[in-house]
Image (spheres, grey):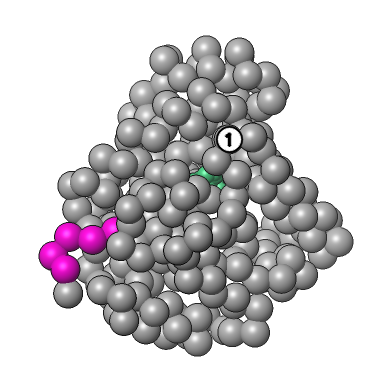
């Protein structure tokens, strides 16, 4: 096995990227980098300050004022997001932040601003990095590229159950409509749209449970390392 390597995991929301990437990171003892959390942090600030996330000039003017910290390797081994020193890891998961994150992520200046930060992680250590453009733009030389997907209805069903368990239920139809809208935004923006890299292994988890997906992913990775 190589000493220092990078695994890119891209795919639409709700395909299971983060849950699986966390499990793989723990198994392989490498760092899990959640790039969506960084876009969520910027989306969160826009939301908090009442800025329309499509307002390019307003969002860009926020960037130099923000002190965004990304911490790995704490007690829980997970990635924590800090904003001006405050841990906002939980706040950025609020359901309304997803669309804000998707909208700010379509702004080219926001993507440029975050590019080097993401690349630096992979230079320093072995990583499994999840996002939308990791295999295509952020780490085009990643050792392994996975495109993880599942049917929209299945992803919506998983999200629906998750919201119910969290005590913030929403009608299934609403969850599905949001998934479809976010897929559309993420796949049709001009810069770094979501798509599978040509050399990515496509894994569809529609008919797999978590354990089956984890095993398949691990096998795919170990075969290539
Ligand atoms: O993975 P997530 O759902 O937390 O990501 C939130 C949004 O951020 C997603 O809708 C699109 C954007 N994003 C992106 O454009 N590029 C990435 N590498 C990661 C996320």
- Residue 83 showing in the rendered view: no
The one of 62 and 183 positioned closer to us in this rendering: 183
Which quarter of the figure is the N terminus placed in? Answer: bottom left
Total numbered circles: 1
Residue 213 within the segment the image draws in magenta: no
Extreme residue in the front direction: 198
In this picture, is 191 found above or below 161? above
Query: Magenta stretch mostly in which secondary structure?
Result: loop
Q: Where is residue 86 in the image (x, y as percent from the top left)?
A: 38, 33
Residue segment shown in magenta: 2-6
| 37 lies left or right of 115 | right
Q: In which quarter of the image is residue 100?
A: top right
Please state the horizontal and vertical placement of residue 141, each as a whole percent of the image. Answer: 32, 53
> Which element type, helix, strand or loop, lies under badge 1?
loop
In the displayed structure, would residue 67 be above or below residue 72?
A: above
Measured from the top left, where is residue 190 in percent x and y?
64, 35
- Image quadrant occupied by the C terminus: bottom left
Q: Quadrant location of residue 167?
A: bottom right
Foreground pick, 217 / 22: 217
Examine the rendered structure and indicate whether residue 160 appears above or below residue 218: above
Question: Residue drawn 31% across and 76% down?
Answer: 224
């Amino acid at each position: 096995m190589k000493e220092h390597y990078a695994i890119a995991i891209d795919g639409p929301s709700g395909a299971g990227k983060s849950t699986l990437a966390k499990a793989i990171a723990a198994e392989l003892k490498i760092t899990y980098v959640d790039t969506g959390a960084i876009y969520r942090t910027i989306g969160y600030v826009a939301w908090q300050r009442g800025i329309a996330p499509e307002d390019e000039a307003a969002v860009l003017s926020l960037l130099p004022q923000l002190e965004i910290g990304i911490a790995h390797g704490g007690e829980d081994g997970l990635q924590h997001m800090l904003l001006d020193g405050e841990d906002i890891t939980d706040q950025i998961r609020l359901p309304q932040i997803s669309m804000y994150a998707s909208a700010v992520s379509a702004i080219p200046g926001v993507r440029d601003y975050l590019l080097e930060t993401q690349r630096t992680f992979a230079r320093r250590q072995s990583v499994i990095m999840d996002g939308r453009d990791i295999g295509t733009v952020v780490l085009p030389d990643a050792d392994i590229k996975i495109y993880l997907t599942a049917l929209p209805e299945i992803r919506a069903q998983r999200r629906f159950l998750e919201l119910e368990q969290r005590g913030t239920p929403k009608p299934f139809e609403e969850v599905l409509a949001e998934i479809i809208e976010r897929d559309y935004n993420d796949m049709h923006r001009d810069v770094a749209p979501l798509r599978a890299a040509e050399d990515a292994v496509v894994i569809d988890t529609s008919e797999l449970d978590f354990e089956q997906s984890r095993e398949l992913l691990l096998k795919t990775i170990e075969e290539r390392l």
